Amino acid sequence: MDKIKDEIERYLMELCVFGHTPQDGVTRLPFTKEARAAAEYLAGKMQELGLAVHVDASGAVIGRLEGAGPDTIIIGSHYDTVENGGKYDGIAGVVCGLSLIRMIKEEYGNSFPYSIEVMATNDEEGARFSGGFFSSKAMLGLWTMEELRKNKDANGISIYDAMKAFGMEPEKLPEAKRDLSEIRAFLEIHIEQGPVLEKSNKEIGIVRAIVGMRRKIVKIYGRADHAGTTPMDMRDDAMEKAARIIAGVGDAARNYLNSVATVGCIKAVPNAINTIASYVEFSLDIRSADQDNLNALERDIQSLITQSASHYEIQETVHIDPVEMDQKLAELLAKTAEDCGYSWMKLDSGAGHDSLITGPAMATAMVFVPSKGGRSHCPQEYTDTEYLKKAVKLVYQAVKQLS
Ligand code: GLV
Ligand code: MN
Ligand code: MN
């Protein structure tokens, strides 16, 4: 019997049913019944652990163990998933937080020098509204009502309306803002979602920096005409223009070290076999841990769009610069990993995380664990709970040493 491993495994398997189908993996988008079920499950487990539970105005589920001192340590990650995602991204960090807070409570009751919170954040992925980082931005008071109204899902439903339909009050979102002077650290345990730890034979990754990212919706306008009767030199084909841009995006990124760019979704109007497309819309996701490379790649893609299309619009939904994790916390985690006898390495995160948002505002650090085959954002995503257990023990030992 291994208590930590068993509880992590049980939590994960009980949670993954919310949005799970065997062939398609887990889809748990924000403000849906699957999200509600996961949030209710988490709130229930927090209550069982004897924590003070509340759901903040962004939909984050927070369980708090009151400590002896005035400051708080938050152990956070997200409970939403991408479409057809896995059983570990985000939620693994949340359940690790549950294990850890149980251990602190068992050892200290309410006499730990810090209050500890497990924070299960809502809509980190941006899979429905393309913005993402909903709770972590709310925690910093970074949302405007205008953004909530403007940011829409594929069905034209805004965050604002989705919240209302879900029974939440968007006007109250500012209430999720935290007093940062009380937060001693934000710590996030997360699966790596890439192949580096496994390839390097390491059990633990200590994150140095998280990539900066730009996310955009690119809208290309053309003219609908008959596909058979309109000569090739008399068309305004939005699909052809979009295709030229999309084909160039990957090549543009390959010009820069440690930089990536992805077009992950596309929509065409009228989307018919025998009509020239009058409109094509696609997403753009550009990332780099290097600020100069990120800016240069963004400029290159911008000129690609300007050269290929005359009538276009670009809506930026995410604009975040790369963020370095708190060096002292990272050093403490590295030293603790060494003391625990775990194999570890430093690495950068190519994935976005709530820690990317909290990083500039409070002392933030991330611990990664290996992803089997580097797979993530797919049903095949898998992480051995042995690694998650080690991450819990590591962070447990590290927070005990926080001064
Ligand atoms: C979230 O996982 C992202 O990096 O897009
Ligand atoms: Mn994640
Ligand atoms: Mn993700």
Image (cartoon, rainbow, N blue to C red):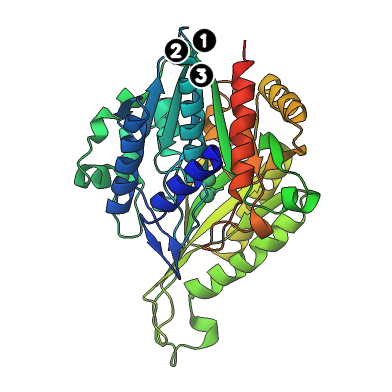
Corner quadrant of residue 20? bottom left
The vertical placement of 113 against 22, above or below, is above
Q: Is residue 198 visible?
A: yes
Q: Earlier in the sequence, mark 3 or mark 1?
A: 3
- Where residue 173 sits in the image (x, y, percent)? 30, 30
Picture residue at 40% right of the left edge, 58% below the top = 27
Q: Disc 1 designates what residue?
A: 113
Q: Earlier in the sequence, mark 2 or mark 1?
A: 2
Q: Secondary structure at mark 3?
A: helix
Query: Would you say the residues marked 2 and 1 are in contact, meaning their CB atoms lie under 8 Å apart?
Result: yes
Picture residue at 61% right of the left edge, 70% below the top = 244
On residue 78, which mark appears?
none
Task: Please tell me which residue lies in front, 25 or 49.
Answer: 49
Q: Disc 2 designates what residue?
A: 67
Q: Is mark 3 within 8 Å of ligand 2?
A: no
Q: CA distance from mark 3 to mark 1?
A: 12 Å
Instruction: Tell which residue pokes out farthest to the top in this image.
Output: 69
Corner quadrant of residue 189? top right
The vertical placement of 248 against 342, above or below, is below
Q: Quadrant of the C terminus?
A: top right
- Where residue 137 sits in the image (x, y, percent)? 44, 32
On residue 107, which mark appears?
3
Q: Is residue 146 visible?
A: no
- Where residue 359 sits in the image (x, y, percent)? 58, 27
